[in-house]
Image: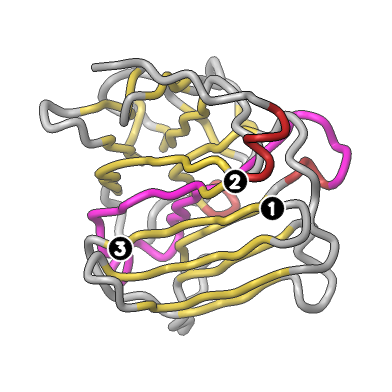
């Protein structure tokens, strides 16, 4: 699948439940698609009698730089079981899968008001998670990843910062980590309102970190529309 000029791999769990969740992940166009305007749509909906989720992964590792998405959907009224994620991930368990997370969710909690969080995995130690509230559509989320820090930002398209957080300790190296975008259910439990969930992502961009790009001479390969 092509989105924002990059090639993405659509996940299918082949009818098996797997993490996160655990959930069933469906790779058909009614769960993951790019519309005529180039926007990515991710869904949680029933597949037969079972709720299924969606996920895409960039086809290549990008290295140090700024990973950014613009999300059209306002998460404020999202179902409390749903989780929207934009994150980096490596299949190797080394350095906690090199995972940096931006997640939008109420985590199934009935009275939770904070529906956003930035995370440097593992999330258990103090200072590894920063939570915040977001009630905006057309919101830009970014991770600026260098050898010494991970800088997370959520802001409106007009530039007003909703939340910014910097982590300088225990930041993993990029290795073969690739960006992923997903929409899933906390603990694999059905939406509380028994309705389908949709998130719309307008664009993804990656800007290489200058010093790293100059030292490696590796530029990401883009696919023209």
For discs 2 and 3, the disc positioned in front in the rendered view = 2
**For this rendering, which residue is in front, 133 or 45?**
133
Q: Is residue 90 magenta?
A: yes
Where residue 91 sits in the image (x, y, percent)?
A: 75, 29
Q: What separation in Å lies between label 3 and label 1 (alpha carbons)?
A: 23 Å
Placement of 97 over or under 107, stated as above or below: above
**Which sits earlier in the primary sequence, circle 2 or circle 3?**
3
Which residue is rendered at x = 85% and y = 37% of the image?
93
**Which sits earlier in the primary sequence, circle 2 or circle 1?**
1
Which segment did they paint magenta? 67-95
Q: Please, what secondary structure does the residue beneath circle 1 have?
A: loop
Q: Please, what secondary structure does the residue beneath circle 2 have?
A: loop
Which residue is rendered at x = 29% and y = 16% of the image?
224
Question: Which disc, if any, is residue 209?
Answer: 2
Label 2 Cα neighbours within 10 Å, binned few <14 / some 14-19 / many ≥20: some
The residue labelled by disc 1 is: 146
Q: What separation in Å lies between label 2 and label 3 (alpha carbons)?
A: 23 Å
Placement of 133 over or under 171, stated as above or below: below
Judged from this view, the residue extending furthest toward the right is 94
Q: What separation in Å lies between label 2 and label 1 (alpha carbons)?
A: 7 Å
Which residue is rendered at x = 86% and y = 45% of the image?
95
Left or right of 179? Residue 90 is right
Q: Please, what secondary structure does the residue beneath circle 3 have?
A: strand
Which residue is rendered at x = 50% and y = 48% of the image?
86
**Which sits earlier in the primary sequence, circle 3 or circle 1?**
3
**For this rendering, which residue is in front, 91 or 176?**
176
The residue labelled by disc 3 is: 139
Q: Quadrant of residue 119?
A: bottom right
Mark 2 and mark 1 in contact? Answer it, CB < 8 Å. yes
Judged from this view, the residue extending furthest toward the left is 36
């Amino acid at each position: 699948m092509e989105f924002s000029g990059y090639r993405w791999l659509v996940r299918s769990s082949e009818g098996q439940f797997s993490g996160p969740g655990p959930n069933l992940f469906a790779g058909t166009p009614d769960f993951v698609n790019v519309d005529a305007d180039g926007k990515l749509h991710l869904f949680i909906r029933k597949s037969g009698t079972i709720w299924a989720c969606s996920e895409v992964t960039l086809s290549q590792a990008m290295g140090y730089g700024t990973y950014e998405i613009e999300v059209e959907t306002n998460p404020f009224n999202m179902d409390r079981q749903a989780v929207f994620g934009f994150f980096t991930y490596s299949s190797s368990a080394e350095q906690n899968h090199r995972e940096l997370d931006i997640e939008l969710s109420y985590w199934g909690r009935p009275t939770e008001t904070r529906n956003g969080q930035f995370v440097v995995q593992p999330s258990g130690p103090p200072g590894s998670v920063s939570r915040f509230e977001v009630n905006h559509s057309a919101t830009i989320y970014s991770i600026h990843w260098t050898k010494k820090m991970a800088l997370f930002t959520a802001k409106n398209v007009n530039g007003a910062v909703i939340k910014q957080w910097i982590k300088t300790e225990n930041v993993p190296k990029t290795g073969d980590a690739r960006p992923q975008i997903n929409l899933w259910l906390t603990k694999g439990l059905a939406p509380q309102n028994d309705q389908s969930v949709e998130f719309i992502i307008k664009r993804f961009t990656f800007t290489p970190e200058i010093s790293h790009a100059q030292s490696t001479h590796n530029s990401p390969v883009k696919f023209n529309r």
